[in-house]
Each structure stands twice: as structure tokens, then as C-alpha cells.
Image (tube, helix red, strand yellow):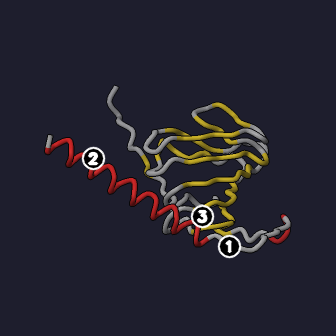
């Protein structure tokens, strides 16, 4: 019975922590209306990503915690097998997002669970732009491939 009580307390503490983290990210969001034309977006290299990957911050801070923004892959970009600590929500805007070899074009939605190993990238003939949102900071954890056959 004590073990069950301890587990319930741990679960409640975890839920409270998640609620506080989400509330903190919500507070960072601007309270006023935000209108950004495409030509006003400030593209910058995505911290922690391979060279050539660019991003636009819309809310939050992708180096510290929850965030939302745009990501741009150059034509032909491919990321090696990797995973992210937090789940990733993606809406494709231009080009295509390639997930484990399958292309998802404009208007597609891709949800990748936390810790799931996958390969991703864009397409050869166009840059790819998509909206991305995560509940934690961006990370790209490369999975070393085994040379065993």
C-alpha cells in the first residue's frame, strides 16, 4: 500500500511539473496580436542542427524549452538516423518533409513521438519549409549505426 501511495505521489508531482512548465511557456507567448508577413520573417541557423538548416522563432525559445516556429531545409537535405527528446509536431508548408523515406507534401501533418529513431529530410528539387512545435528544447540525437552484418 505504501508503494502504491509513493507511486501516486510521484505521478502527481510529475503532472504538476508538466503543468508548471506549460504555464511558463504560455506566459512567454505574447499577449498582443502578432502579424508577420513572409518577407518580415527573420531566418537564422537552427542551433543544434546540421549546417544549412534555418529557423524562425514564433514563440518560446528552442534552445531552452517549449517553442513553435518555422524550419527550412535546403534542397537535398537529409538528416541521419536520430531521435528527439520531446515529441515533434510538424505541418508542411513548402516542398516536402521526408520521414523514413516517405514524402509528405504541403498541408501534411507529421507527429513524431519522443525518442522514436527516424531519418528525415527534404526533397532534392526544392527547399522545404514547415511549421514545427515541441514541448521542450530542440535536440538532434544522432544514432550511431552498427557496422555489424
- Judging by the rendered image, the residue that carries numbered circle 1 is 30
**Vertical arrangement, residue 77 with respect to residue 137, above or below:** above
Relative to 54, 148 lies left or right: left
**Vertical arrangement, residue 136 with respect to residue 57, above or below:** above
Q: Earlier in the sequence, mark 3 or mark 2?
A: 2
Which is in the foreground here, disc 3 or disc 2? 2
Badge 1 vs badge 2, beta-carbon distance below 8 Å? no
Q: Earlier in the sequence, mark 3 or mark 1?
A: 1
Residue 28 screen position, x and y as percent: 59, 72
**Total count of labels:** 3
Q: Which structural element holds mark 2?
A: helix
Relative to 17, 107 lies left or right: right
Q: Which structural element holds mark 3?
A: loop
Which of the two residues, 131 or 66, is positioned nearer the viewer here?
66
Residue pictured at 51% horizontal, 44% vertical: 80
Which of the two residues, 117 or 15, is positioned nearer the viewer here?
15
Q: Earlier in the sequence, mark 1 or mark 2?
A: 2
**Vertical arrangement, residue 54 with respect to residue 109, above or below:** below
**Going by the picture, which residue comes out furthest to the left?**
2
Residue pictured at 52% horizontal, 65% vertical: 23
What is the CA distance from the residue labelled 1 to the residue labelled 2? 35 Å
- Judging by the rendered image, the residue that carries numbered circle 2 is 8
The label on residue 72 is none
Q: Which structural element holds mark 1?
A: loop
What is the CA distance from the residue labelled 3 to the residue labelled 1? 22 Å
Residue 61 screen position, x and y as percent: 56, 69
Amino acid at each position: 500500500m505504501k508503494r502504491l501511495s509513493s507511486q501516486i505521489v510521484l505521478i502527481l508531482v510529475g503532472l504538476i511539473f508538466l503543468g508548471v512548465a506549460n504555464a511558463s511557456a504560455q506566459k512567454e507567448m505574447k499577449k498582443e496580436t502578432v502579424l508577420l508577413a513572409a518577407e518580415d520573417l527573420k531566418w537564422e541557423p537552427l542551433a543544434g542542427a546540421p549546417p544549412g538548416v534555418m529557423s524562425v522563432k514564433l514563440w518560446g525559445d528552442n534552445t531552452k524549452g517549449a517553442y513553435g516556429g518555422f524550419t527550412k531545409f535546403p534542397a537535398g537535405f537529409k538528416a541521419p538516423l536520430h531521435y528527439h527528446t520531446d515529441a515533434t509536431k510538424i505541418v508542411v508548408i513548402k516542398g516536402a518533409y521526408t520521414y523514413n523515406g516517405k514524402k509528405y507534401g504541403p498541408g501534411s501533418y507529421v507527429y513524431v513521438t519522443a525518442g522514436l529513431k527516424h531519418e528525415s529530410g527534404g526533397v532534392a528539387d526544392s527547399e522545404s519549409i514547415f511549421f514545427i512545435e515541441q514541448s521542450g528544447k530542440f535536440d538532434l540525437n544522432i544514432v550511431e549505426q552498427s557496422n555489424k552484418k
